[in-house]
């Protein structure tokens, strides 16, 4: 009985459902990363722990370029505590599958990978996340949804050992 309770608590904390990317195939507006992120974009977001408490808020200034092979995203983060961070992504569109992308940035373990369907993009990667004075390995499962008027919603689960540590919620706006 004790084991069943532990399993039920684990499932409740981590959620049982999983979204299916194909469910968004006909949703509009259609998302094309290399078009959306070319030029200037601003994002505002929060990190929420697994209990729903907002731990950090931040703003990201993004400048993107598409050279026909790589989408380069230069991201300047400014956190509510005044700290700053910089990340540069190199994202490549798969030649054999126009809906598939892979990429890397400093801190990413291996390669990030994702797929687009309609207005949705699912992007997964392992990452060395700075937490205080140390770095921990976590996994990100990002879901992005393009909305009308150039808004993009991003919800990312952050996990370690399969346990959800929290979520990152971002709103992107084209400038």
Image (cartoon, rainbow, N blue to C red):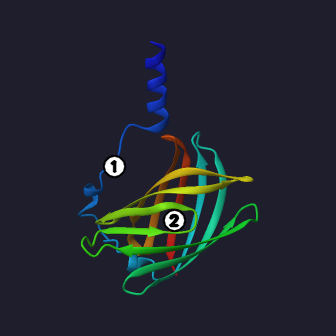
Say few, some or many: other residues with alpha carbon within 10 Å of mark 2 (under 14 / 14 to 19 / 20 or more): some
Mark 2–mark 1 CB contact (< 8 Å): no
Name the element at disc 1: loop
Work out whether 122 lies above or below 50: below
Name the element at disc 2: strand
Give how far apart the Cα atoms at labels 2 and 1 are.
20 Å
Q: Which of the two discs, 2 and 1, sits closer to the camera?
A: 1
142 or 91, nearer to the observer: 91
Identify which residue is drawn at 30% across, 56% down: 21
123 or 174, nearer to the observer: 123
Residue 29, quarter of the rendered image: bottom left
Please state the horizontal and vertical placement of residue 102, each as a whole percent of the image.
39, 68
**Res 52 label:** none
Residue 83, quarter of the rendered image: bottom right
Q: Which residue matches tag 2? A: 171
Residue 149, quarter of the rendered image: bottom left
Please state the horizontal and vertical placement of residue 74, each as a whole percent of the image.
56, 77
Outermost residue on the bottom side: it is 67
**Res 19 label:** 1
Pointer 2 or 1: first along the chain:
1
Left or right position of 132 against 150: right
Please state the horizontal and vertical placement of residue 54, each as a whole percent of the image.
64, 49
Identify which residue is drawn at 46% across, 57% down: 125
Left or right position of 128 against 13: right
Identify which residue is drawn at 42% across, 80% down: 70
């Amino acid at each position: 009985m004790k084991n069943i309770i532990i399993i039920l608590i684990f499932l409740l904390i981590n959620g049982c459902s999983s979204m299916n990317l194909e469910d968004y195939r006909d949703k509009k507006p259609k998302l094309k990363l290399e078009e959306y992120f070319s030029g200037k974009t601003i994002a505002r977001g929060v990190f929420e722990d697994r209990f729903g408490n907002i731990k950090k808020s931040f703003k990201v200034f993004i400048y993107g370029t598409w050279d026909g092979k790589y989408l380069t995203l230069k991201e300047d983060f400014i956190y509510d505590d005044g700290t700053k961070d910089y990340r540069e992504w190199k994202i490549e569109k798969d030649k054999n599958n126009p809906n598939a992308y892979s990429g890397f940035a400093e801190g990413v373990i291996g390669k990030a990978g994702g797929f687009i369907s309609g207005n949705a993009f699912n992007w997964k990667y392992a990452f060395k996340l700075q937490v205080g004075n140390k770095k921990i390995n976590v996994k990100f499962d990002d879901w992005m949804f393009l909305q009308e008027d150039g808004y993009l919603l991003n919800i990312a689960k952050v996990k370690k050992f399969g346990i959800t540590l929290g979520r990152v919620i971002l709103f992107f706006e084209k400038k």
